[in-house]
Image (tube, rainbow, N blue to C red):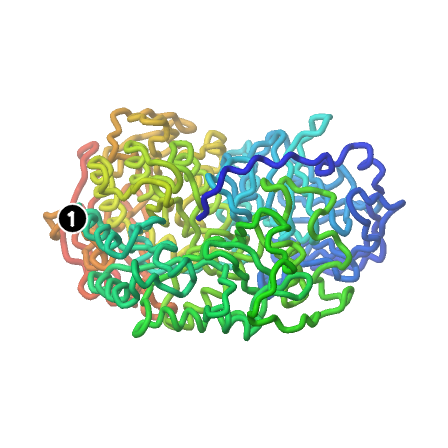
Amino acid sequence: MIMMPKPALALLSLLSIASAAPLATCPGYRVTNVRSGPSYLVADLTLAGTNCSLYSEDITNLRLTVEYQTDTRLHVLIADREQNVYQIQDNILPRPLSQNASSQTADLRFTYEANPFSFKVTRASTGDVLFDTSPSPLIFETQYLRLRTRLPPNPNLYGLGEHSDSFRLATNGYKRTLWNSEAPYIPQNQNLYGSHPVYFEHRGGGNGTGVTHGVFLRSAAGMDVVIERSDAGEQYLEYNTIGGVFDFYFLAGPGPEEVSKQYAEVIGLPAMMPYWSLGFHQCKYGWPDLGHVKQVVKNYSDAGIPLEALWDDIDYMDNKLDFSTDPVRYPKDQLKAFVDDLHGKDMRYVQILDPGIRYKSDYGPFTRGAEKDVFLKAADGSWYRGLQWPGEVVWPDWIAPQTKEWWTTEILTFYDPNNGIDADGLWVDMNEASNMCADTTCLSSAQKTRSLPQPKPVISPRAPGDGQHLGLPNRDLFTPKYQIANHYPTLSSRTLFTNITNSDGSTQYDTHNLYALTMSSVSRSALLSRSPTKRPFLLTRSTFSGSSRFAAHWFGDNFSSWADYRASIRQLLSFSAIHNYPMVGSDVCGFNGQAQENMCARWAVLGAWQPFYRNHADISAPDQEFYRWPSVAAAARKAIGVRYRLLDYIYTGLYSASKTGEPALVKPLWFLFPSDPATYGIDTQFFLGDALLVSPVVEDDAQSVSFYLPQGKWYDFFTHHRIDQTSAGGRNVTVSGVGWDQIPVYIRGGSILALRLSDASFISGQAMTTAEVRTRNFEIIIAPDQNGKAKGRLYLDDGESLDSSGKESEIEFSWNGTMFEAKGTFGYDTKGVLVQRVVLLDDGVSGNGQREVSGRWALTGGFTTNLYI
């Protein structure tokens, strides 16, 4: 959350694109001293000729390590032999354990050429080459690494986030830069808030199948990933990094969902979120005082729009200081009473925290942190200082062990349920880290001296060259010769200076992209200390691979425009399906700028079909709560009503994702139709789970939409009208007259949905909170496929316990054409909630008719019912 002019795109330095002439002189490496076994290969790589030194000094001696870790995961590590070059610390991103699979039976095969060294990764079952570095020599310098792989023509590539570009990546003249950055307006073709150096490639098969594989580069280095065609027309993908090593994990799939699960095994499973976090959330930067906030809550109630959680931005703080409340506008006792009142209504409250801690002698969090030596230091040993919202700040070193103790104590004190603000969750922002200092001349440590606590003397935790892979000495940490295409002028622009040394001896040059990941890890740990038996809720703006283990994510400071409305779908697909990040969403109606009524109505509806659902706007933007326009209020009431009926379906997907890494919440069409080429580029539709195809209106101010309906049997979610798409392939469908409160959604044939009842004929009206939703009975919707069969699932627990073992229900539903069955485990006490009716769509007797059976089936054990008796 920061308002500043849109930065001009930094001009690419000629040094950032290596020309053909010097590259042709680079000798590459030769392979020696090969040692191998059934599940591994280790070899030395030695520079094969005269130093190339394009952008820095060549590293002469490398080590190649190949591990067949599982039948579907191949690990290839190319690192310096002395192990001094930086590698991500295992305690920050734990490595997966190898199961020592056999190279003879594994799905992926590694082969190499010895001089100059290149390697291929091949799919054993088909012989398809998935990764081939032979087009050009390996370059491994102290501050520049390059590796190029050959690709098939016009490949289907996805990932390499965070970005707002097309879901399927461009393949000609395209560059993805990974360097976490403040990114107002989420511009396209630029680096944004997070870095996820993973891509999926999907290859359609000619025999009615399609296969997918994944490539994860376990590197936090700033990098450009170039997708381009050579002068000869050959397609390639090329890594250009300013540090680190080549630490690859190749994932065999062969199905796209299998690749997602395999990727989750490498970076860690996403955290299971509390049930309430799936409700609707409201926030705004710029609310003037607590009285205004109370009025917002009342206005939602008066408008009949369910509001689950009220969020406070930095407005609640005293002079924008973390762990404080404004004594006039947000008096602590009144804010505490307000939060208690929300809890009495089964509502929730979330506050923001920023990493910048005010550099001030009478500010407790600073003085306590200084005493524990938790803040980052400048090169001269002084506290490193910059600018964030409260003014001059210092930044925590999240890698330092003592930082966790300090941060946890501050959170336990300020958010003490009895004497503090009993917040239900936290939101960490500005953690790229964002620094309002434009360059390295801002607040240099020599500028001022104050009578403030001084840092303890710097004692290096290591000696340069000691083999701990924490980074090489004697590098240019500000201006490396190879300049990645960062959208700010330099690496240190608007962020922490890259020459800062962390407590373990690594530098921000190497760990910049990990700052938010480590903050999220420490913050989640603090929340667990506060409530050890409950799932924490944490939201982060900046991310890296593995951040989903700790926090949900929103897509940052977008703009109130139709273009960013559309971009939210692309971002949703990338994070949910490719980056192992199920709990995500955009700022509904846009953060910056003035929301237009029709657009906000559409976005209110679209947002209800995304996992994280929050309306949020900047201080410079007009108020845009849903009740501000009659049409938007009507759209929101209807959309939230539908969402709340589906909460357990969404929650079940979230549970599956947290257990297996399955992208069970949101997925692209090609995940379910991998052999249909028409689905590969679609990024304006998505599946919610396996059962619901969501096809929103996407054109400006339109009330019609054309979308793709794949082969199969489909049912309109709202009318239950059946559509048969039985011919080979799918077809484009146009729906007209789509009201501002409507969105085309279709149930995929073969699905069973468990929905909460909300209509007045069964229970009194719309549930206003998720707690009320949980008291509602279920109805079962059966949507048979072309063979008359269907299946589904439902997960139930108390919605908040960190460990629900033995107290959860995992229920499998099936329909065989005449009999409906529910079976599984039934450990959760539903407190009287039961299945009240079963609805069969397309009953096979009356065309588009449906058959309903009412009853009272308890969810305490399995049951069956014959719908034709």
The answer to whether residue 788 is visible is no
> Crowding near pointer 1: few (<14 within 10 Å), some, many (20+)?
few
Say whether residue 388 is left or right of residue 584.
right
Q: Position of residue 515 (x, y in %)?
A: 56, 57
SS state under label 1:
helix
Say whether residue 182 is left or right of residue 11.
left
- Please determine whether, in this image, residue 543 is positioned above or below residue 784: below
Three-letter amino acid code of the residue under disc 1: Asp
Quick one: 580 or 407, which is closer to the camera? 407
Quick one: 854 or 868, which is closer to the camera? 854
Q: Would you identify the image quadrant in which residue 634 lies?
A: top left
- Please determine whether, in this image, residue 372 is positioned above or below residue 750: below
Q: Position of residue 25 (x, y in %)?
A: 85, 38
Quick one: 22 or 293, which is closer to the camera? 293
The residue under the point 32% across, 69% down is 807
Residue farthest toward the left in the current orientation of the protein: 761
Q: Position of residue 344 (x, y in %)?
A: 20, 64
How many numbered discs sit on the rendered protein?
1
The answer to whether residue 764 is visible is yes
Say whether residue 529 is left or right of residue 277.
right
Quick one: 817 or 404, which is closer to the camera? 404
The residue under the point 54% across, 62% down is 394
Q: Position of residue 855 (x, y in %)?
A: 14, 54
- Please determine whether, in this image, residue 86 is positioned above or below residue 150: below
Check disc 1 and report the residue beneath it. 302
